[in-house]
Image: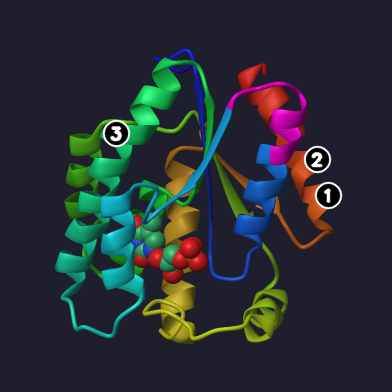
Amino acid sequence: MSRYPGLFITLEGGEGAGKSTAAKGLADALRAEGHEVLATREPGGTPGAEAIRALLLGTDTPLHPMAQTMLHFAARADHVETVLRPALERGAIVICDRYYDSTMAYQGYAQGVGVEQVASLIRLVDLTPDLSFFLRVPGDVAKARLTSRAGASDRYERMGEDFTARLMQGFEAIQAQEPERCLWVDSSGAPEAVVATLRRLIAERAGR
Ligand code: TMP
């Protein structure tokens, strides 16, 4: 399935879907089995991309949605070429907390940048995940998780309910377009149960 000896897995979802906890648990489980695992995130994963993340998420600096889109892809280009591709070439399992499906859902759909515009940038980076898990929980569970989180919310967490509805429609559309790669996973259960589901799906779909 992959063009590389490694395996590229991404985790996606709305805010409060438990992605980061699941990513960490999955990485630990695969490492315990003896796999080389690279756990990383977007925007971020390199010093340059983390600096772009700080601009995108850590500030209120106004940025046109198209500019946000291109910054997400600038961060991604650095991450792909200096970290992700080399890791996949040496045979690692890469687990990435968000990737380009987030740009399609957040910028392409929810912020109205447009599907074709984002698709053209996706073609440019030219690195497709082998498997993408779209984590989802009922809306009230997500809301409760977000309110219990410490710290200030970022640019996207403050967008409101219409934005969240467009975002979820975006993820639905992406999944419907690529049902082999993109799998919905209910993440409302205990973290260990979510990790066990992901582990089983990787074995079934990617034979690892
Ligand atoms: P997270 O680390 O909590 O997932 O935060 C990343 C935020 O950035 C989240 O609100 C989703 C948003 N985002 C985009 O809008 N576009 C993207 O391409 C990526 C990777 C993230």
Whether the magenta-drawn stretch holds residue 204 is answered as no
Q: Where is residue 38 in the image (x, y as percent from the top left)?
A: 53, 34
**Residue on which the image places disc 2:** 196
Whether the magenta-drawn stretch holds residue 34 is answered as yes
CB under 8 Å between discs 2 and 1? yes
Marks 3/2: CA distance? Answer: 30 Å
Marks 2/1: CA distance? Answer: 6 Å
- Give the mark toward the camera: 3 or 2: 3
In the image, residue 153 above or below residue 65: below
Magenta part of the protein: which range? 28-36
Q: Which of marks 3 and 2 is nearer the N terminus?
A: 3
**Residue on which the image places disc 3:** 82
Q: Can residue 154 be seen in this view?
A: yes
**Residue on which the image places disc 1:** 192
Residue at 26% over, 52% down: 48
> Circle 1 — which element?
helix
In the image, residue 104 above or below residue 205: below
The amino acid sitting under disc 3 is Thr
CB under 8 Å between discs 3 and 2? no
In the image, residue 172 above or below residue 81: below
Mark 1 packing: few (<14 Cα in 10 Å), some, or many (20+)? some
The amino acid sitting under disc 2 is Ala
Mark 2 packing: few (<14 Cα in 10 Å), some, or many (20+)? some
Left of 137 or right of it: where is 129? left
The amino acid sitting under disc 1 is Glu
